Image (cartoon, rainbow, N blue to C red):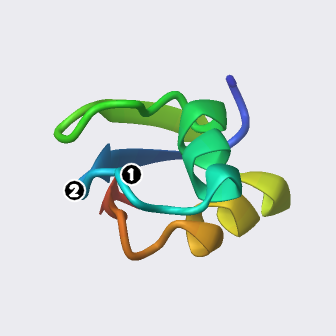
Amino acid sequence: MSDMASLTVRQTASPIRRAKDQRATLVGLGLNRVGRVATLDDTPSVRGMIRKVQHMVEVVEG
């Protein structure tokens, strides 16, 4: 993580009554509770995961 940019993501909504793959994506991002924050490498795969659950998360810092 030395040269790579990072993203800080906060979960803003509950995964209750959401599709299993969306719940799994949140877990993959290191989120599983409303208000939890995760700092992740800024890679295309992480961006895709964030896009998949964009209605339940917010990017805090870019």
- Of circles 2 and 1, which is in front? 1
| Residue type highlighted by circle 2 | Thr
**Residue that lies at the very extreme toward the left in this rendered image:** 35
Left or right, 28 with respect to 58, comes to right
What mark, if any, has residue 15 been given in the picture? Answer: 1
The picture quadrant where one finds residue 33 is top left
Q: Are marks 2 and 1 in contact (CB under 8 Å)?
A: no
Quarter containing the C terminus: bottom left
Q: Which structural element holds mark 2?
A: loop
**Cα gap from disc 2 to disc 1, whole angstroms:** 10 Å
Looking at the picture, does residue 52 appear above or below residue 39?
below
Q: Amino acid at mark 1?
A: Pro
Q: Nearer the viewer, residue 30 or 19?
A: 19
Labelled disc at residue 12: 2
Q: Is residue 5 visible?
A: no
**Mark 1 element type:** loop
x then y, percent, for residue 59 = 36, 61
